[in-house]
Image: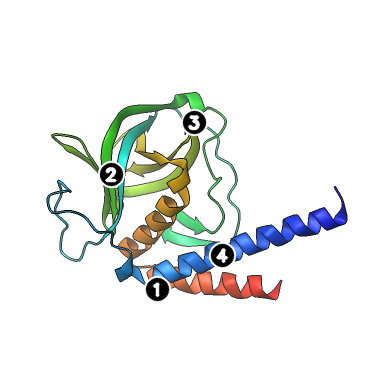
Amino acid sequence: MSETADFDRDLDAWHEEKRHVDELLHMARNLDKLTPRVEPGELSVELKGVEQLLVVLHGSGIVELKATGDRGGPRGVGYRVTKGVSYRAGAHDDTYVSRPEVQRITHSGGKAIITTHRVVYMFPNRNRTWEYAKAVDVFHSDTVSQGWGASYIEVSNRKNSSGFIYRSGFARTVRDRLVIALAVADGTLEDMITALETERAELERI
């Protein structure tokens, strides 16, 4: 590969990372504008107190991880969001990659929501909830099924890792809003904004 091609590739990567940081900063600074519109009766859960709705995923599903695979290494500048959970811009390939066969979709065709307190998957007659207060780890996968991504939320009250799925095209939106939700729940949103501002300043100096 020529030096010009290398330069163009690096420049494209720089622009993409800077754009991503700018998007995250905008969302974190304008949390009140992230709430999607929903029809009356569309959700089978009631929001509690100051809990804010951030994402509604139609056609979602539940995925379970029966055994642990190897995760890819995280990239980028990071900081602690909550217990065992860190944010890193551009790190969405930090996934389970070595043993994708242990991932199993156990339900599909439902609806999932992400709020500032929890993720809820809505079955026809019941819900499954992942409370951030009980989260011990959060990680993502792009190998659960062709065209689908997944976010796993390990919680202290369940033995197996489980999470929810979404179309691959929505992966960045889902994962960015999830990490913002975790920061809000843990009271570290301002820390996240500060870290993003620092990262953006460093990118400007490159």
Q: Residue furthest top?
A: 101
Q: Amino acid at mark 1?
A: Arg
Q: What residue is drawn where x is 64% and y is 64%?
A: 15
- Compare marks 1 and 3 and give the one earlier in the sequence: 1
Identify whether 38 is placed above or below 163.
below
Q: Amino acid at mark 2?
A: Ala
Identify whether 41 is placed above or below 168.
below
- Compare marks 3 and 4 and give the one earlier in the sequence: 4
Residue receiving disc 2? 112
**Quadrant the C terminus occupies:** bottom right
Q: CA distance from mark 2 to mark 3?
A: 20 Å
The mark found on residue 29 in the picture is 1
> Which SS class for mark 4?
helix
- Compare marks 4 and 2 and give the one earlier in the sequence: 4
Q: CA distance from mark 2 to mark 1?
A: 24 Å
- Compare marks 2 and 1 and give the one earlier in the sequence: 1
Q: Which of the two residues, 80 or 57, is positioned nearer the viewer here?
A: 57
Identify whether 124 is placed above or below 131.
above
Q: CA distance from mark 3 to mark 4?
A: 27 Å
Residue receiving disc 3? 146
The mark found on residue 19 in the picture is 4
Q: What residue is drawn where x is 17% and y is 48%?
A: 42
